[in-house]
Amino acid sequence: MKELFLLINDLFNNILFFDIFFNQIEGVTFPFVVALLIVSGVYLTLKMGFVNLRMFRHSLAIVRGKYKTREDKGVISPFQSLATALSATVGIGNIAAVSIAISLGGAGAAFWMILAGFLGMTLKFTEVTLSIKYRQFLPDGTIIGGGMEYLSRGLADKGMGKIGKAIAMIFAFFMILGALGAGNTFQISQSLSIVQGQIPIFNDYPWAFGVIMAFVTGLVIIGGIKRIAHVAEKIVPLMVVFYLLMVFWVLGTYFTSIPDAFALIFREAFSPTAVAGGLFGAMVQGFQRAVFSNEAGLGSAGIAHSASRVKYPIRQGLVSLYEPFVDTVVVCTMTALVVILTGSYLGGTEVLDAAIAAKQGAVITSTAFGSVVSWFPTILGFAIFMFAFSTMISWSYYGERAWVYLFGAKSSIIYKLIFLGFIVIATVMDTGLMVDFSSTLFLALAIPNLFGLIIMSGDVRKMLTDYTKKLKSGELDAEAIRD
């Protein structure tokens, strides 16, 4: 099994990421897909007129339910969709991926993570808008959307039907594997490393942790998107606030050093230490780990948002602006400050071996919190358990919708059983290999997705222009339901 994972991982890296065509810059390989994410994020941000800034306030009003109409269609509220998508993104990536990025790319990687979050807001807006526009209501009462639908149907509208169908199938295949990898095994392997430190019995019986997680996860995902959304809207706000309270405690302890931490982040972002791989090492780690955390540009979140009760596709796209903002600009930045201020990132200026960092990301963050309050790692263990759980229930749905797209709704129970089985498998496999493999699959999703976003970006721009005109004229306020 290990040899198979290695073979597939090398194939994806060499063919999909075109690493074999890139010379090493400052000793760091600059993957094609990272460059593609940066260019696409900048392009769409400019094309949409910085929608991530100018429509931020309006999107909050939508989340609060101000613009509900009688013509809204869907099965869950915009906030429930946002909570479901956030439950997939606000997770172990915010704890482990940040530490990995800083350990491999230096403190400057935090700056590039924040920038990736800012650009990711527009990427997420574009893909969610297209997800709503091209979603389909199935006979069984469920809704299918996301990259599979807008790549196949959207590109067909552009006269690229055959290409779109082929790309959509590739995307769905990557989504299933990504759900089993990054959305499942990575979450379990990282959370297990923390839980074992707090509950010693899991050192001898790691599979028992997997069985417990599989059972709890199964209770939720068998119920479909409505049950997932109901659970997500309850636990996501709670776990974010819970985690940030811990962060603020640490930041309060190091309050006078916070300006120095930000200065270090900016200084090393543009003139980083040589051991961090130079400027490009920090940039690659920052963007790669940010995408792993907030999933902007991957086309995954649109699957959750496609079930939203909304009238205008643009409206749910605006709601999705809060995902990368909360996940990366807020939560990841807070984690980065904790790791940097406590000096817990693998010796500070000595960058760790990639394989070791992949295994120890969550442990590094736990050590950072423990250096301030001895019992914080125990509390963090609970938070990590909740983060992993929330991410898995959402990613199980993403993978299940991709499975339905490829194999039909009647076989979805097969996927769910496979997903639950991988939870147990993750407790007895090489975690470093799983992290590497799942990261590869995550980034692989971006290639077909970004191709579609660029091709259809003109349609999104037109819808945005029409929507803002209606907003300024007062038409949207007039049609809103008054509670």
Image (tube, grey):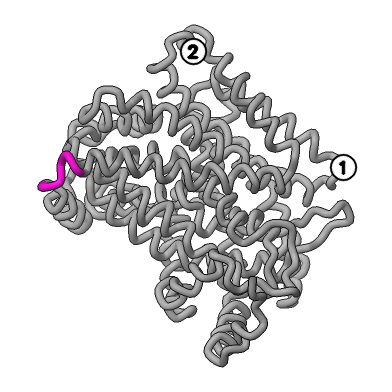
The stretch drawn in magenta includes residue 172 = no
Q: Which residue is drawn at 67% across and 75% down?
A: 481
Q: Which residue is drawn at 60% across and 87% down?
A: 466
Q: In this view, does 265 lie above or below 374?
A: below
Please identify the quarter of the rendering in which residue 477 is found.
Answer: bottom right
Query: Label 2's element?
Result: helix
Cα–Cα span, label 2 and label 1: 36 Å
Q: Is residue 417 visible?
A: yes
Q: Nearer the viewer, mark 2 or mark 1?
A: 2
Q: Is residue 163 visible?
A: no
Would residue 147 be found to the left or right of residue 2 on screen?
Answer: right
Q: Residues within 10 Å of mark 2 (few under 14, many from 20)?
A: some
Q: Return the residue at label 1.
A: 410
Question: What amino acid is at disc 2?
Answer: Phe
Query: Label 1's element?
Result: helix
Return the x and y of residue 377 as percentages of the image width and height.
33, 26
Q: Which residue is drawn at 27% across and 32% down?
A: 369
Q: Return the residue at label 2.
A: 202
